[in-house]
Image: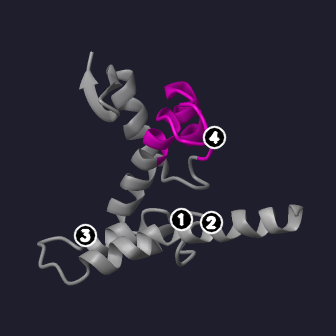
Amino acid sequence: MLLSISCYIHALRELIKEHSRSGYEILKDVDLPWPVAEIVLQHHERLDGSGYPDGLKGEQIRLESKIIAVADVVETITSHRPYRSALGVDAALNEIINNSGKLYDPEIVKACLALFKRGYTFEFELGLPAVRER
C-alpha cells in the first residue's frame, strides 16, 4: 500500500512539472514581440541546474525566466494551497535569500527584496493576489 501511494505521489509530481512545457506548447506558435513561450518554458529552471524541464544552468536561463522564477516562488509560498496554509512573506523572502546565488539570481533577489522594503505587500481579495504599495 505504501509503495502505491509513493508511486502515485511521484507520478503526480511529474505531471505537475509538465505545466511549463504545456504552457510552452500553447504559446509557441503565438506571434508575440517577445519570446514568451521560451520564458514560460524556463520559469522553473534554477541557476544550479536543479530545475525543470531541461535542467538548464546559469546563463542558459533567460533573464525574464529568472525574474518569473523569483516572483513565482514568493507568490507560491505566500499563498494558500490545497495541501498547506500560506506560509507568509517572511518565509518567502527567507527562501529567496537563503538560495540566492544557488537557485535564484542574486540581482533579482536583491530587486525583489527592495520592493518589499519599499512597502509592497500582498493583499488577497476573492482568492486572487494583488500587489499594492503601502
Its colouring scheme is one colour
Name the residue at 38% across, 26% down: 116
Between 114 and 44, the one lying in front of the other is 44
- Disc 1 marks a residue whose amino acid type is Ile
Seen in the image, is 115 located left or right of residue 75? left
- The residue tagged 2 is 12
User: Reading the chain from its start, which is encountered first: label 2 or label 4?
Assistant: 2
Q: Position of residue 9 (x, y in %)?
A: 70, 62
Q: Earlier in the sequence, mark 4 or mark 1?
A: 1
| Residue at mark 1 | 16
Using residue 55 as the reference point, say whether residue 40 is left or right of it: left
Q: Read off the residue under disc 4.
A: 98
Task: From the top left corner, tell me how far across and down residue 20 is, in percent.
Answer: 42, 69
> Going 66% across and 71% down the picture, which residue do you hit?
11
- Secondary structure of the residue carrying tag 1 is helix
Q: Please state which amino acid type lies under the numbered disc 4.
A: Asn
In whole angstroms, how far apart are the C-alphas of marks 2 and 4?
Answer: 27 Å
Q: Secondary structure at mark 4?
A: helix
Which residues are drawn in magenta? Answer: 73-99
Q: Mark 3 touching mark 1, by CB under 8 A?
A: no
Compare marks 4 and 3 and give the one earlier in the sequence. 3
| Point 28% across, 76% down: residue | 26
Q: Is residue 49 visible?
A: no
Q: Which residue is mark 3?
A: 36
